[in-house]
Amino acid sequence: MLDPITFFVSQFRDLLPEKPEPLRSFLPRPYRNAAVRFSGSSIHAFEERRALVEEAGLNVFSFPARKIAGCDLLTDSGTTTMTLEQWAAMVMGDESYGSNEGYFEVKEQIPITFGPEWEQRDELRENFFIFHQGRSAEHNFFNLFAGELRKSLPSDIKGLSNELPPDLKTRIESRIKGMRRPYFIIPSNSHFDTTEGNIEDSRLIPLNLPSPEHLEKNRDFPFRGNIDLSALETLLDTVGERVPLVYLTITNNTGGGQPVSMENIRRVRELTDKHDIPLFFDACRFAENAWFIQQNEPGYEDMPIPKIVYEMFHHVDGFHISFKKDGLVNIGGGMAFKDDGRFTQKYPDFWMKMIDRQILTEGHPTYGGLAGRDLKALVEGLRLVTSQEYLDYRISQVKRFGAKLESYDIPIVRPTGGHAVYIDLDRFFAGTETDDEDLKGIAFTALMLVAGHRLVELGLYAFGKLKDGKEIPPNPRVNFIRASVPRLAYEDQDLFSVAEAVRVLNDYKDRIPAVEVVYGRDLFLRHFKSRFRFKL
Ligand SMILES: Cc1ncc(COP(=O)(O)O)c(C=O)c1O
Protein backbone atom coordinates (compact mmCIF):
# COMPACT_ATOMS: atom_id res chain seq x y z
CA MET A 1 0.00 0.00 0.00
CA LEU A 2 1.23 3.49 -0.89
CA ASP A 3 2.04 5.88 1.88
CA PRO A 4 -0.59 8.64 2.04
CA ILE A 5 1.69 11.34 0.62
CA THR A 6 2.68 9.23 -2.39
CA PHE A 7 -0.99 8.36 -2.83
CA PHE A 8 -1.96 12.03 -2.99
CA VAL A 9 0.91 12.89 -5.31
CA SER A 10 -0.35 10.26 -7.74
CA GLN A 11 -3.91 11.60 -7.44
CA PHE A 12 -2.72 15.14 -8.17
CA ARG A 13 -0.71 13.87 -11.11
CA ASP A 14 -3.85 12.29 -12.54
CA LEU A 15 -5.35 15.77 -12.75
CA LEU A 16 -2.83 16.54 -15.49
CA PRO A 17 -3.42 13.98 -18.24
CA GLU A 18 -1.44 14.30 -21.46
CA LYS A 19 -4.46 15.52 -23.38
CA PRO A 20 -6.59 17.51 -20.95
CA GLU A 21 -10.29 17.75 -21.60
CA PRO A 22 -10.80 21.20 -23.06
CA LEU A 23 -13.59 22.26 -20.74
CA ARG A 24 -11.92 21.31 -17.44
CA SER A 25 -9.17 23.49 -16.11
CA PHE A 26 -6.60 21.06 -14.79
CA LEU A 27 -3.75 23.33 -15.59
CA PRO A 28 -3.11 26.58 -13.80
CA ARG A 29 -1.76 29.39 -15.97
CA PRO A 30 2.04 29.23 -16.09
CA TYR A 31 2.16 32.88 -15.00
CA ARG A 32 0.32 35.19 -12.64
CA ASN A 33 -0.76 38.79 -12.88
CA ALA A 34 1.85 41.32 -11.93
CA ALA A 35 -0.36 44.27 -12.83
CA VAL A 36 -3.98 44.57 -13.90
CA ARG A 37 -6.04 47.14 -15.67
CA PHE A 38 -9.68 47.74 -14.83
CA SER A 39 -11.76 48.01 -17.98
CA GLY A 40 -13.41 51.20 -16.75
CA SER A 41 -16.86 50.42 -18.07
CA SER A 42 -19.70 48.27 -16.83
CA ILE A 43 -20.99 45.16 -18.58
CA HIS A 44 -24.49 46.43 -17.69
CA ALA A 45 -24.16 49.56 -19.89
CA PHE A 46 -25.99 48.03 -22.88
CA GLU A 47 -27.85 51.18 -23.91
CA GLU A 48 -24.69 53.27 -23.81
CA ARG A 49 -22.90 50.74 -26.03
CA ARG A 50 -25.85 50.58 -28.41
CA ALA A 51 -25.65 54.36 -28.89
CA LEU A 52 -21.87 54.21 -29.33
CA VAL A 53 -22.11 51.39 -31.87
CA GLU A 54 -24.57 53.39 -33.93
CA GLU A 55 -22.40 56.49 -33.63
CA ALA A 56 -19.43 54.43 -34.86
CA GLY A 57 -21.40 53.43 -37.95
CA LEU A 58 -21.36 49.79 -36.74
CA ASN A 59 -17.67 49.74 -37.59
CA VAL A 60 -15.79 47.81 -34.92
CA PHE A 61 -12.57 49.69 -35.57
CA SER A 62 -14.27 52.98 -34.64
CA PHE A 63 -15.74 51.81 -31.34
CA PRO A 64 -13.91 53.33 -28.31
CA ALA A 65 -11.86 50.58 -26.67
CA ARG A 66 -12.37 52.10 -23.23
CA LYS A 67 -16.06 51.25 -23.50
CA ILE A 68 -15.48 47.53 -24.04
CA ALA A 69 -16.49 45.98 -20.76
CA GLY A 70 -15.77 42.40 -21.83
CA CYS A 71 -13.12 41.03 -24.18
CA ASP A 72 -11.48 43.00 -26.95
CA LEU A 73 -10.84 40.22 -29.47
CA LEU A 74 -10.40 42.53 -32.46
CA THR A 75 -6.86 41.34 -32.94
CA ASP A 76 -4.01 39.48 -31.29
CA SER A 77 -1.67 42.03 -32.86
CA GLY A 78 0.13 44.39 -30.50
CA THR A 79 -2.30 43.49 -27.72
CA THR A 80 0.04 41.22 -25.77
CA THR A 81 0.36 41.73 -22.04
CA MET A 82 4.10 42.03 -21.58
CA THR A 83 6.06 40.24 -18.89
CA LEU A 84 7.88 41.90 -16.02
CA GLU A 85 11.15 41.00 -17.76
CA GLN A 86 9.98 43.01 -20.78
CA TRP A 87 8.92 46.01 -18.71
CA ALA A 88 12.18 45.88 -16.79
CA ALA A 89 14.13 45.77 -20.06
CA MET A 90 12.16 48.77 -21.33
CA VAL A 91 13.28 50.83 -18.38
CA MET A 92 16.83 50.09 -19.49
CA GLY A 93 16.08 51.31 -23.05
CA ASP A 94 18.93 53.13 -24.75
CA GLU A 95 17.48 56.01 -26.77
CA SER A 96 20.60 56.89 -28.72
CA TYR A 97 19.94 57.83 -32.34
CA GLY A 98 22.62 55.62 -33.83
CA SER A 99 23.54 52.06 -32.86
CA ASN A 100 21.66 51.89 -29.58
CA GLU A 101 22.12 48.99 -27.20
CA GLY A 102 18.83 47.32 -28.14
CA TYR A 103 19.87 47.13 -31.79
CA PHE A 104 22.89 44.97 -30.98
CA GLU A 105 20.83 42.78 -28.68
CA VAL A 106 18.17 42.25 -31.37
CA LYS A 107 20.86 41.41 -33.94
CA GLU A 108 22.26 38.87 -31.50
CA GLN A 109 18.84 37.40 -30.76
CA ILE A 110 17.75 36.90 -34.40
CA PRO A 111 20.04 33.90 -35.08
CA ILE A 112 19.29 32.52 -31.61
CA THR A 113 15.57 32.53 -32.34
CA PHE A 114 15.49 31.78 -36.08
CA GLY A 115 18.66 29.72 -36.48
CA PRO A 116 22.36 30.29 -37.04
CA GLU A 117 21.82 30.67 -40.78
CA TRP A 118 20.30 34.09 -40.06
CA GLU A 119 23.47 35.52 -38.63
CA GLN A 120 24.95 38.36 -40.65
CA ARG A 121 28.04 36.89 -42.28
CA ASP A 122 29.25 39.84 -44.31
CA GLU A 123 30.51 42.70 -42.20
CA LEU A 124 28.87 45.34 -44.41
CA ARG A 125 25.83 43.67 -45.89
CA GLU A 126 22.95 44.15 -43.46
CA ASN A 127 20.60 41.16 -43.51
CA PHE A 128 17.98 42.27 -40.97
CA PHE A 129 15.91 45.42 -41.26
CA ILE A 130 13.85 46.92 -38.45
CA PHE A 131 10.53 48.61 -39.23
CA HIS A 132 7.91 50.02 -36.93
CA GLN A 133 5.47 47.28 -37.87
CA GLY A 134 4.94 44.43 -40.29
CA ARG A 135 3.10 46.35 -42.99
CA SER A 136 5.76 48.99 -43.18
CA ALA A 137 8.31 46.25 -43.92
CA GLU A 138 5.92 44.82 -46.54
CA HIS A 139 5.21 48.18 -48.12
CA ASN A 140 8.83 49.15 -48.53
CA PHE A 141 9.88 45.70 -49.63
CA PHE A 142 7.23 45.18 -52.32
CA ASN A 143 7.64 48.70 -53.64
CA LEU A 144 11.36 48.23 -54.10
CA PHE A 145 10.99 44.71 -55.38
CA ALA A 146 8.48 45.72 -58.05
CA GLY A 147 10.91 48.39 -59.28
CA GLU A 148 13.68 45.81 -59.38
CA LEU A 149 11.53 43.38 -61.36
CA ARG A 150 10.53 45.92 -63.96
CA LYS A 151 14.17 46.67 -64.67
CA SER A 152 15.05 43.04 -65.26
CA LEU A 153 12.03 42.14 -67.35
CA PRO A 154 12.65 40.58 -70.78
CA SER A 155 10.98 42.72 -73.47
CA ASP A 156 9.22 39.81 -75.20
CA ILE A 157 7.25 38.49 -72.25
CA LYS A 158 4.09 36.82 -73.56
CA GLY A 159 0.46 36.82 -72.45
CA LEU A 160 -0.73 34.38 -69.82
CA SER A 161 -0.15 30.81 -70.85
CA ASN A 162 -3.09 28.94 -72.33
CA GLU A 163 -1.94 25.90 -70.43
CA LEU A 164 -3.13 27.45 -67.17
CA PRO A 165 -6.29 25.79 -65.87
CA PRO A 166 -9.26 28.13 -66.56
CA ASP A 167 -9.93 28.72 -62.86
CA LEU A 168 -6.38 29.91 -62.13
CA LYS A 169 -6.33 31.97 -65.32
CA THR A 170 -9.57 33.75 -64.45
CA ARG A 171 -8.38 34.46 -60.92
CA ILE A 172 -5.14 35.98 -62.16
CA GLU A 173 -6.83 37.93 -64.95
CA SER A 174 -9.38 39.40 -62.55
CA ARG A 175 -6.43 41.00 -60.70
CA ILE A 176 -4.70 42.32 -63.80
CA LYS A 177 -7.39 44.80 -64.81
CA GLY A 178 -6.03 48.29 -65.00
CA MET A 179 -2.44 47.24 -64.36
CA ARG A 180 0.23 48.37 -66.72
CA ARG A 181 1.90 45.35 -68.24
CA PRO A 182 4.20 43.61 -67.65
CA TYR A 183 3.10 41.96 -64.46
CA PHE A 184 4.26 39.43 -61.91
CA ILE A 185 2.39 37.06 -59.63
CA ILE A 186 3.19 36.48 -55.94
CA PRO A 187 1.46 33.28 -54.80
CA SER A 188 0.90 32.31 -51.18
CA ASN A 189 -1.16 29.91 -49.09
CA SER A 190 -3.09 33.14 -48.29
CA HIS A 191 -1.76 36.66 -48.08
CA PHE A 192 -2.82 38.73 -45.11
CA ASP A 193 -4.97 41.72 -46.13
CA THR A 194 -2.26 44.38 -45.80
CA THR A 195 0.24 42.13 -47.55
CA GLU A 196 -2.24 41.66 -50.37
CA GLY A 197 -2.89 45.44 -50.43
CA ASN A 198 0.83 46.23 -50.53
CA ILE A 199 1.48 43.74 -53.33
CA GLU A 200 -1.34 45.24 -55.39
CA ASP A 201 -0.21 48.74 -54.56
CA SER A 202 3.15 47.84 -56.11
CA ARG A 203 1.34 46.63 -59.26
CA LEU A 204 2.11 43.01 -58.58
CA ILE A 205 -0.55 40.32 -58.42
CA PRO A 206 -1.24 38.54 -55.12
CA LEU A 207 -2.60 35.04 -55.65
CA ASN A 208 -3.97 32.91 -52.83
CA LEU A 209 -3.66 29.16 -53.27
CA PRO A 210 -5.03 27.64 -50.05
CA SER A 211 -4.99 23.85 -49.81
CA PRO A 212 -8.21 22.05 -50.76
CA GLU A 213 -8.65 20.98 -47.11
CA HIS A 214 -8.84 24.65 -46.23
CA LEU A 215 -12.26 24.78 -47.85
CA GLU A 216 -13.59 21.62 -46.15
CA LYS A 217 -14.84 23.46 -43.14
CA ASN A 218 -16.48 20.59 -41.31
CA ARG A 219 -13.52 18.27 -41.12
CA ASP A 220 -10.65 18.25 -38.68
CA PHE A 221 -7.46 18.61 -40.63
CA PRO A 222 -4.33 19.47 -38.66
CA PHE A 223 -2.62 21.59 -41.32
CA ARG A 224 -5.41 23.54 -42.87
CA GLY A 225 -2.98 26.42 -43.51
CA ASN A 226 -1.05 24.52 -46.19
CA ILE A 227 -0.65 25.85 -49.69
CA ASP A 228 -2.24 23.90 -52.55
CA LEU A 229 0.88 22.18 -53.87
CA SER A 230 -0.62 20.99 -57.11
CA ALA A 231 -1.98 24.47 -57.99
CA LEU A 232 1.42 25.96 -57.18
CA GLU A 233 3.16 23.36 -59.32
CA THR A 234 0.84 24.08 -62.25
CA LEU A 235 1.40 27.80 -61.85
CA LEU A 236 5.18 27.45 -61.78
CA ASP A 237 5.23 24.94 -64.67
CA THR A 238 3.10 27.15 -66.90
CA VAL A 239 3.93 30.76 -66.02
CA GLY A 240 6.96 30.33 -63.74
CA GLU A 241 8.78 33.23 -65.43
CA ARG A 242 6.11 35.53 -64.01
CA VAL A 243 6.55 34.31 -60.44
CA PRO A 244 9.53 36.07 -58.83
CA LEU A 245 8.78 35.03 -55.25
CA VAL A 246 6.62 32.50 -53.39
CA TYR A 247 5.21 33.24 -49.93
CA LEU A 248 3.96 31.10 -47.08
CA THR A 249 2.09 32.82 -44.26
CA ILE A 250 2.76 31.01 -40.98
CA THR A 251 0.34 30.52 -39.45
CA ASN A 252 -2.18 31.25 -42.15
CA ASN A 253 -4.12 34.15 -40.67
CA THR A 254 -6.70 34.62 -43.40
CA GLY A 255 -7.55 30.94 -43.42
CA GLY A 256 -8.22 30.65 -39.70
CA GLY A 257 -4.88 31.04 -37.91
CA GLN A 258 -4.10 27.61 -39.27
CA PRO A 259 -0.65 26.04 -39.36
CA VAL A 260 1.46 24.97 -42.30
CA SER A 261 3.14 21.57 -41.98
CA MET A 262 6.89 21.05 -42.29
CA GLU A 263 6.11 18.64 -45.12
CA ASN A 264 4.28 21.41 -46.99
CA ILE A 265 7.13 23.88 -46.39
CA ARG A 266 9.64 21.31 -47.62
CA ARG A 267 7.63 20.51 -50.75
CA VAL A 268 7.24 24.21 -51.59
CA ARG A 269 11.00 24.57 -51.20
CA GLU A 270 11.51 21.71 -53.68
CA LEU A 271 9.19 23.34 -56.21
CA THR A 272 10.81 26.77 -55.83
CA ASP A 273 14.28 25.19 -56.07
CA LYS A 274 13.27 23.52 -59.32
CA HIS A 275 12.23 26.89 -60.76
CA ASP A 276 15.00 28.92 -59.12
CA ILE A 277 12.54 31.12 -57.23
CA PRO A 278 13.13 32.53 -53.73
CA LEU A 279 10.77 31.46 -50.95
CA PHE A 280 9.74 33.80 -48.12
CA PHE A 281 7.69 33.50 -44.95
CA ASP A 282 5.24 36.01 -43.62
CA ALA A 283 6.43 34.84 -40.23
CA CYS A 284 4.18 36.70 -37.76
CA ARG A 285 3.15 33.57 -35.82
CA PHE A 286 6.16 31.36 -36.42
CA ALA A 287 6.32 29.98 -32.86
CA GLU A 288 2.65 29.01 -32.86
CA ASN A 289 3.19 27.29 -36.21
CA ALA A 290 6.15 25.36 -34.76
CA TRP A 291 4.00 24.24 -31.81
CA PHE A 292 1.42 22.74 -34.18
CA ILE A 293 4.15 20.89 -36.06
CA GLN A 294 5.40 19.47 -32.75
CA GLN A 295 1.93 18.40 -31.67
CA ASN A 296 0.57 17.05 -34.95
CA GLU A 297 3.27 16.12 -37.44
CA PRO A 298 4.82 12.66 -37.21
CA GLY A 299 8.51 12.79 -36.41
CA TYR A 300 8.40 16.09 -34.52
CA GLU A 301 6.68 15.06 -31.28
CA ASP A 302 9.92 14.98 -29.29
CA MET A 303 11.65 17.89 -30.95
CA PRO A 304 12.00 21.09 -28.88
CA ILE A 305 10.25 24.13 -30.35
CA PRO A 306 13.46 26.13 -31.03
CA LYS A 307 14.79 23.27 -33.17
CA ILE A 308 11.55 23.07 -35.16
CA VAL A 309 11.78 26.83 -35.75
CA TYR A 310 15.34 26.42 -37.07
CA GLU A 311 14.20 23.73 -39.47
CA MET A 312 11.27 25.82 -40.71
CA PHE A 313 13.51 28.82 -41.36
CA HIS A 314 16.19 26.67 -42.95
CA HIS A 315 13.86 26.27 -45.94
CA VAL A 316 13.33 29.97 -46.70
CA ASP A 317 15.43 32.74 -48.21
CA GLY A 318 13.82 35.60 -46.34
CA PHE A 319 10.92 36.64 -44.19
CA HIS A 320 9.00 39.61 -43.05
CA ILE A 321 7.43 39.68 -39.64
CA SER A 322 5.20 41.72 -37.43
CA PHE A 323 6.68 41.39 -33.95
CA LYS A 324 3.29 42.45 -32.59
CA LYS A 325 2.38 38.77 -32.65
CA ASP A 326 5.11 36.27 -31.83
CA GLY A 327 7.57 39.00 -30.85
CA LEU A 328 5.22 39.43 -27.85
CA VAL A 329 5.48 43.22 -28.10
CA ASN A 330 3.04 46.04 -28.68
CA ILE A 331 4.87 47.48 -31.68
CA GLY A 332 7.58 46.37 -34.11
CA GLY A 333 8.28 44.71 -37.42
CA GLY A 334 11.19 43.45 -39.46
CA MET A 335 12.46 41.89 -42.64
CA ALA A 336 15.34 39.49 -43.09
CA PHE A 337 17.23 38.08 -46.08
CA LYS A 338 19.38 35.01 -45.56
CA ASP A 339 22.99 35.82 -46.38
CA ASP A 340 23.54 32.85 -48.67
CA GLY A 341 19.88 32.50 -49.68
CA ARG A 342 18.50 32.55 -53.21
CA PHE A 343 17.08 36.07 -52.82
CA THR A 344 20.45 37.56 -51.84
CA GLN A 345 22.13 35.66 -54.68
CA LYS A 346 19.66 37.04 -57.22
CA TYR A 347 19.50 40.58 -55.87
CA PRO A 348 22.86 41.13 -54.17
CA ASP A 349 22.42 44.91 -53.81
CA PHE A 350 18.84 44.90 -52.63
CA TRP A 351 19.86 45.33 -48.99
CA MET A 352 21.24 48.78 -49.75
CA LYS A 353 17.90 49.92 -51.12
CA MET A 354 16.20 48.62 -47.97
CA ILE A 355 18.55 50.72 -45.89
CA ASP A 356 17.78 53.80 -47.98
CA ARG A 357 14.08 53.15 -47.46
CA GLN A 358 14.54 52.75 -43.73
CA ILE A 359 16.32 56.09 -43.59
CA LEU A 360 13.67 57.79 -45.72
CA THR A 361 10.62 56.38 -43.96
CA GLU A 362 11.59 55.08 -40.51
CA GLY A 363 14.80 56.63 -39.21
CA HIS A 364 18.28 55.30 -38.77
CA PRO A 365 18.40 51.57 -39.63
CA THR A 366 19.59 50.78 -36.13
CA TYR A 367 16.23 51.73 -34.65
CA GLY A 368 13.93 51.47 -37.69
CA GLY A 369 11.03 53.55 -36.41
CA LEU A 370 11.08 52.06 -32.91
CA ALA A 371 12.21 53.50 -29.63
CA GLY A 372 15.32 51.91 -28.15
CA ARG A 373 13.15 50.57 -25.32
CA ASP A 374 10.89 48.79 -27.82
CA LEU A 375 13.90 46.86 -29.09
CA LYS A 376 14.75 45.79 -25.55
CA ALA A 377 11.22 44.50 -25.00
CA LEU A 378 11.40 42.63 -28.30
CA VAL A 379 14.54 40.76 -27.28
CA GLU A 380 12.79 39.52 -24.12
CA GLY A 381 9.69 38.63 -26.14
CA LEU A 382 11.70 36.55 -28.61
CA ARG A 383 13.33 34.74 -25.71
CA LEU A 384 10.01 33.75 -24.18
CA VAL A 385 7.93 32.98 -27.24
CA THR A 386 9.47 29.63 -28.14
CA SER A 387 9.19 28.24 -24.62
CA GLN A 388 7.10 25.12 -24.29
CA GLU A 389 5.16 26.22 -21.21
CA TYR A 390 4.17 29.53 -22.81
CA LEU A 391 3.01 27.92 -26.08
CA ASP A 392 1.25 24.98 -24.40
CA TYR A 393 -0.87 27.34 -22.39
CA ARG A 394 -1.37 29.92 -25.11
CA ILE A 395 -2.71 27.55 -27.72
CA SER A 396 -4.67 25.34 -25.35
CA GLN A 397 -6.52 28.44 -24.17
CA VAL A 398 -7.61 29.20 -27.73
CA LYS A 399 -8.67 25.57 -28.02
CA ARG A 400 -10.76 25.73 -24.84
CA PHE A 401 -12.49 28.86 -26.11
CA GLY A 402 -13.32 27.08 -29.37
CA ALA A 403 -14.58 24.01 -27.50
CA LYS A 404 -16.84 26.21 -25.38
CA LEU A 405 -18.37 27.74 -28.53
CA GLU A 406 -18.82 24.32 -30.04
CA SER A 407 -20.54 23.07 -26.90
CA TYR A 408 -23.21 25.65 -27.81
CA ASP A 409 -23.38 24.34 -31.40
CA ILE A 410 -21.65 27.41 -32.82
CA PRO A 411 -19.98 26.35 -36.08
CA ILE A 412 -16.28 27.14 -35.95
CA VAL A 413 -13.38 26.31 -38.21
CA ARG A 414 -11.91 23.08 -36.92
CA PRO A 415 -9.46 22.49 -35.53
CA THR A 416 -9.01 25.88 -33.88
CA GLY A 417 -5.95 27.83 -34.96
CA GLY A 418 -3.16 29.27 -32.85
CA HIS A 419 -4.39 32.76 -32.19
CA ALA A 420 -8.05 32.94 -32.99
CA VAL A 421 -11.33 31.13 -33.24
CA TYR A 422 -13.12 31.60 -36.52
CA ILE A 423 -16.89 31.37 -36.54
CA ASP A 424 -18.11 30.11 -39.89
CA LEU A 425 -20.89 32.47 -40.93
CA ASP A 426 -22.09 30.38 -43.86
CA ARG A 427 -22.86 27.50 -41.52
CA PHE A 428 -24.06 29.80 -38.76
CA PHE A 429 -26.74 31.34 -41.00
CA ALA A 430 -27.53 28.15 -42.97
CA GLY A 431 -31.26 27.54 -42.95
CA THR A 432 -32.12 31.22 -42.37
CA GLU A 433 -33.21 33.61 -45.05
CA THR A 434 -29.89 35.34 -45.58
CA ASP A 435 -28.48 36.89 -48.70
CA ASP A 436 -24.85 37.94 -49.21
CA GLU A 437 -26.11 41.51 -49.68
CA ASP A 438 -27.49 41.50 -46.10
CA LEU A 439 -23.93 41.65 -44.68
CA LYS A 440 -25.05 39.83 -41.54
CA GLY A 441 -21.44 39.44 -40.45
CA ILE A 442 -21.36 43.19 -39.83
CA ALA A 443 -24.62 42.95 -37.86
CA PHE A 444 -23.13 40.06 -35.85
CA THR A 445 -20.10 42.08 -34.74
CA ALA A 446 -22.21 45.17 -34.02
CA LEU A 447 -24.49 43.12 -31.74
CA MET A 448 -21.47 41.61 -30.01
CA LEU A 449 -20.25 45.14 -29.26
CA VAL A 450 -23.60 45.89 -27.69
CA ALA A 451 -23.10 42.73 -25.61
CA GLY A 452 -19.71 44.12 -24.49
CA HIS A 453 -17.17 42.26 -26.68
CA ARG A 454 -15.30 43.18 -29.85
CA LEU A 455 -14.86 40.65 -32.67
CA VAL A 456 -14.28 41.32 -36.37
CA GLU A 457 -15.85 40.26 -39.64
CA LEU A 458 -13.32 38.71 -41.99
CA GLY A 459 -15.54 37.56 -44.77
CA LEU A 460 -17.81 38.85 -47.49
CA TYR A 461 -17.31 42.50 -46.58
CA ALA A 462 -13.61 42.45 -45.65
CA PHE A 463 -12.56 40.40 -48.65
CA GLY A 464 -15.43 40.82 -51.12
CA LYS A 465 -15.75 43.58 -53.68
CA LEU A 466 -18.45 45.79 -55.07
CA LYS A 467 -18.88 45.30 -58.80
CA ASP A 468 -21.60 46.92 -60.91
CA GLY A 469 -23.60 47.66 -57.77
CA LYS A 470 -23.44 44.06 -56.56
CA GLU A 471 -21.42 42.35 -53.84
CA ILE A 472 -18.96 39.83 -55.27
CA PRO A 473 -17.79 37.34 -52.61
CA PRO A 474 -14.09 36.55 -52.34
CA ASN A 475 -12.81 33.67 -54.44
CA PRO A 476 -12.16 31.20 -52.86
CA ARG A 477 -15.11 32.10 -50.63
CA VAL A 478 -14.30 32.97 -47.02
CA ASN A 479 -16.97 34.16 -44.62
CA PHE A 480 -15.85 34.26 -41.02
CA ILE A 481 -16.10 36.17 -37.78
CA ARG A 482 -12.70 36.21 -36.13
CA ALA A 483 -12.29 36.21 -32.37
CA SER A 484 -8.57 36.75 -31.80
CA VAL A 485 -7.13 35.99 -28.41
CA PRO A 486 -4.54 38.53 -27.21
CA ARG A 487 -1.49 36.88 -25.68
CA LEU A 488 -1.30 36.64 -21.87
CA ALA A 489 -4.22 39.05 -21.48
CA TYR A 490 -7.43 37.18 -20.67
CA GLU A 491 -8.50 34.31 -18.49
CA ASP A 492 -10.79 31.50 -19.59
CA GLN A 493 -13.67 33.04 -17.66
CA ASP A 494 -13.45 36.17 -19.85
CA LEU A 495 -13.45 34.16 -23.07
CA PHE A 496 -16.31 32.00 -21.85
CA SER A 497 -18.37 35.15 -21.33
CA VAL A 498 -17.89 35.89 -25.05
CA ALA A 499 -19.16 32.39 -25.84
CA GLU A 500 -22.30 33.11 -23.79
CA ALA A 501 -23.06 36.21 -25.88
CA VAL A 502 -22.49 34.31 -29.13
CA ARG A 503 -24.84 31.64 -27.83
CA VAL A 504 -27.60 34.26 -27.61
CA LEU A 505 -27.00 35.27 -31.24
CA ASN A 506 -27.08 31.63 -32.23
CA ASP A 507 -30.35 30.99 -30.39
CA TYR A 508 -32.01 33.96 -32.11
CA LYS A 509 -30.14 34.09 -35.41
CA ASP A 510 -33.40 34.65 -37.34
CA ARG A 511 -33.69 37.99 -35.57
CA ILE A 512 -30.26 39.29 -36.54
CA PRO A 513 -31.05 42.18 -38.88
CA ALA A 514 -29.46 42.97 -42.24
CA VAL A 515 -27.31 46.09 -42.50
CA GLU A 516 -26.80 48.62 -45.26
CA VAL A 517 -23.62 50.42 -46.13
CA VAL A 518 -23.88 54.18 -45.78
CA TYR A 519 -20.28 55.01 -46.61
CA GLY A 520 -17.26 53.47 -48.28
CA ARG A 521 -18.62 50.41 -50.02
CA ASP A 522 -16.33 50.89 -53.02
CA LEU A 523 -13.23 52.03 -51.12
CA PHE A 524 -9.88 50.21 -51.12
CA LEU A 525 -9.52 48.21 -47.84
CA ARG A 526 -13.09 49.24 -47.21
CA HIS A 527 -13.75 47.31 -43.99
CA PHE A 528 -11.45 49.61 -42.03
CA LYS A 529 -13.31 52.72 -43.15
CA SER A 530 -16.93 51.94 -44.03
CA ARG A 531 -19.97 52.96 -42.05
CA PHE A 532 -23.18 50.95 -41.81
CA ARG A 533 -26.63 51.07 -40.27
CA PHE A 534 -29.06 48.37 -39.21
CA LYS A 535 -32.00 47.82 -41.54
CA LEU A 536 -34.71 47.73 -38.89
C1 LIG B 1 -0.17 37.37 -41.29
C2 LIG B 1 0.05 38.84 -41.10
N1 LIG B 1 0.90 39.49 -41.90
C3 LIG B 1 1.15 40.80 -41.75
C4 LIG B 1 0.50 41.55 -40.79
C5 LIG B 1 0.78 43.03 -40.67
O1 LIG B 1 1.50 43.32 -39.52
P1 LIG B 1 1.35 44.73 -38.74
O2 LIG B 1 0.00 44.74 -38.13
O3 LIG B 1 2.46 44.76 -37.75
O4 LIG B 1 1.51 45.80 -39.75
C6 LIG B 1 -0.43 40.92 -39.95
C7 LIG B 1 -1.15 41.72 -38.92
O5 LIG B 1 -2.12 41.31 -38.32
C8 LIG B 1 -0.64 39.52 -40.10
O6 LIG B 1 -1.50 38.85 -39.31
Image (cartoon, rainbow, N blue to C red):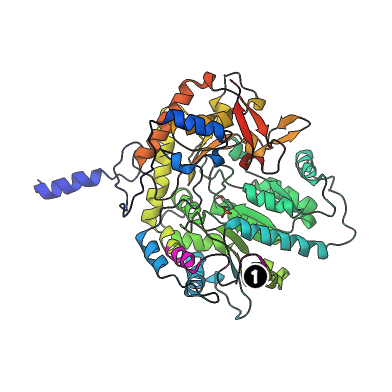
**Residue 51 % position (x, y):** 50, 30
Q: Which residue is mark 1?
A: 359
> What amino acid does circle 1 point to?
Ile
> Per the image, is 363 magenta?
yes
The C terminus lies in quadrant? top right
**Residue 251 % position (x, y):** 54, 50
Vertical relation: 89 (above or below) 466 = below
> Per the image, is 456 magenta?
no
Q: Is residue 35 visible?
A: yes
Choose top left, top right, bottom left or bottom right for residue 167: top right
Q: Around disc 1, counting alpha carbons within 10 Å, would you say few (fewer than 14), some (14 to 19), or many (20 or more)?
A: some
**Residue 30 % position (x, y):** 32, 52
In the rendered view, does 172 fall on the left or right side of 4? right
Front residue of this view, candidates 504 and 337: 504
Vertical relation: 473 (above or below) 301 = above
> What number of labels is visible?
1
- Magenta range: 359-380
Choose top left, top right, bottom left or bottom right for residue 520: top right
Which SS class for mark 1? helix
**Residue 37 % position (x, y):** 36, 48
Instruction: State the residue at coordinates (59%, 44%).
Output: 254
